Amino acid sequence: MKKFITLCLAFCGLVQSLCASDDFFVPVRSTELRAPAVPLLTSDPFFSIWSPCDRLYDRDAIHWSGAEKPLSGAVRVDGEVYRFMGEADSTVLAFTRAAEQKSVDVLPTQTYYTFECGPVELDLVFTAPLLPDDLDLLSAPVNYVSYRVRAIDRKSHSVQLYLEVSPWMAVNTTDQPTVADAFSEGGLSYLRCGTIEQAYTDNIGDAVGIDWGYLYLAGRTGSRISLSLGGSAEMKEAFAGTGQLLLSCRELVNRDPSLTHAMAYSEDLGAVGKDGRTGFMMIGYDDIYCVEYMFRRQAAYWKHGGEVGITDVFGRAASDYDSVMRRCREFDELMYSDGENAGGRKYAELLSLSYRQVIAAHKLFADEEGNLLFFSKENGSNGCINTVDLTYPSAPLFLVYNTDLLKGMMTSIFEYSASGRWNKPFPAHDLGKYPKANGQIYDGDMPIEEGGNMLVLAAAISKVEGNASYAARYWNLLTVWADYLVKYGQDPENQLCTDDFAGHWAHNANLSAKAIMGIAGYSEMARMLGMEDTADRYMDIARRMAEQWKKDAADGDHYRLAFDRTGTWSQKYNIVWDKLWGLGLFTDVMEKEIPYYLTKQNRYGLPLDCRKEYTKSDWIMWIAAMAPDRGTMDLFVNPVYDFANESPTRQPLGDWHESVSGEAYHFRARSVIGGYWMPVLMSKYGR
């Protein structure tokens, strides 16, 4: 049975709207966190655009990888131009004056900016309606950009608004030729741009951009709204001079990368007084095919097998604007409140920053058998697709808000083994390199790591849903994996764990703890399926292994990193499930480890282990969830907040950083930040 969130306010219905409600421009909660990068347009690993600076006009927007994906914006007030978004264009003097940014607030689905533009104030809202209880909205690649302009001097002013998107959104490298066109359909005007070559799903790798499919801008068709194609400088000059765009051409082919072209949107807001004027436009990306899965190209979930087209999605987004915006506000309030109740304001603000990053690191689709599949990309690490040890740390978010999405990451791993294409007695590490998911490509296996991950997560789903029906579908595989952990999990050989950047390490105590929790999880599922003898047998094994673990890992006032290494220590984040499920296998270990960790804290968090000063912030949140009280939990959460708030590395939130300097490593924009929701999961389901 699907597990959906219960929204705290009633659904508002489908409302036709010509303008935005004023309350859409006031965040449901104000936030103080200075994001290392601010989410602007977010949908999936390719359509993921961020502002890497404090003020929206200090630098051009970027893809999560750091590639420039410029967005420009300005308002013209009584003939004077105030730039509020994007770097100054030195060739257009009228666009060099910046507005004054007054505030920025980042909530789970929306980013709010306020600017002072001479005698008027501009409110700007970027909305990605990534609602976990609505898979059509979650997968639809359309974002809103909403705006409100109000006079702040009790006078009336003539105001025009300008928004520009670069064709670079649709290319991997800026020397790729593009073609753009303009058309109208269903009361909306569109601009569309894509590469000429259109090599579907061929561009594989880590820090790469999409170069197939089409970028779209859309706005309501009307006398005051214009959409136009042309040279960027010429378009800005025309707007600065007249408040209007250049006359649009119907098609624009750009074969010369030295020329800067623009897809521009403008609205003449007319005479604006203290009551203000509002509006919205939409930006989206139709990738045609999103991934290749087992050698078949797949379309995104929202297409429903070709029954729904991109203009259908834009049309629905326009007509449902009011209801979708209200639902986003309701969800933002719900998620913020969940975080605040579990861990306070700073924790809630971290979750608010993290949500769009986690969702946009995935792609949702369904295979030929109708299985819902939700594939992650290893952003900033190696570009693998649907990596099991990314699924594991990201799981708390999905266990709280929709377990079907977590199943969507696991089903393909089960099916890969069931097909016979993977015949080892433990799960695969991945299914390929994004966007091709045709089988594992990682150079090396993680037997205990991935076996423990799949067993623990199957058990976690069963616990949240109150039944083990999903696990029952793959019980034979789960049994093979559980028996592997029984045989090899007590004292792991020299193999990798999920923290593979730290290298191989034999006799890894934390990896052994994962094996024990996997076996315990198998026992819990067996009991839910009525297999009492099996459940008792495997729980007895888990308890004996846990007792042996404590003897082998004991090192005075703490427990070792490796069984054979005295004087070492490490985060034992894998035992958090013991507290969540109330099994009592490692309760005494937590009571000893948590105080010890507090003696090892640095300014920006608890190091991963004794070898280096770097840390993984997702695991810190799992440690925080094991804290005996809120005060102790804050001691782990607050340094992570400080890292996000002060890190000199301006990129989407990194999960691997130096705990002394606050500098982030190359991991960025990854789904593992879903692990930040472990304290929320503990507050809702802990025993």
Image (spheres, rainbow, N blue to C red):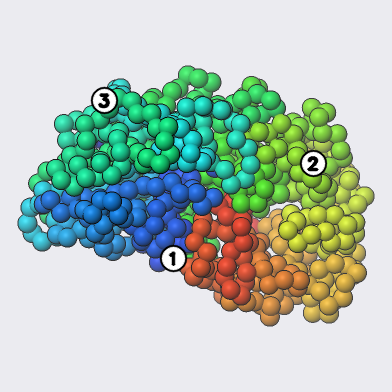
Q: Which residue position is annotated with label 1?
A: 33
* Residue nearest the viewer, comparing 515 with 582: 515
Q: Earlier in the sequence, mark 3 or mark 1?
A: 1
> Left or right of 430: which side holds 2?
left
Residue at (62% x, 72% y) in the render: 659
SS category of the residue bearing label 1: loop
* Residue nearest the viewer, comparing 214 with 251: 251
State the mark number for residue 187.
Answer: 3
> Left or right of 95: which side holds 576?
right
Using a 10 Å C-alpha cutoff, classify the residue at mark 1 as few (fewer than 14 neighbours), some (14 to 19) or many (20 or more): many
SS category of the residue bearing label 3: loop
Mark 3 or 2: in front is: 3
Residue 515 pos. (x, y %): 82, 53
Marks 3/1: CA–CA distance:
40 Å
Cβ atoms under marks 3 and 2 closer than 8 Å: no
Residue reaching furthest to the top: 307
Q: Earlier in the sequence, mark 3 or mark 2?
A: 3
The residue type indicated by label 3 comes to: Gly
State the mark number for residue 427.
Answer: 2
Marks 3/2: CA–CA distance:
50 Å
> Left or right of 105: which side holds 177?
right
The residue type indicated by label 2 comes to: Pro
Query: Is the C terminus in the top left, top right, bottom left or bottom right quadrant?
Result: bottom right
* Residue nearest the viewer, comparing 233 with 187: 233
SS category of the residue bearing label 2: loop
Q: Quadrant of residue 251?
A: top left
Marks 2/1: CA–CA distance:
39 Å
Q: Earlier in the sequence, mark 2 or mark 1?
A: 1
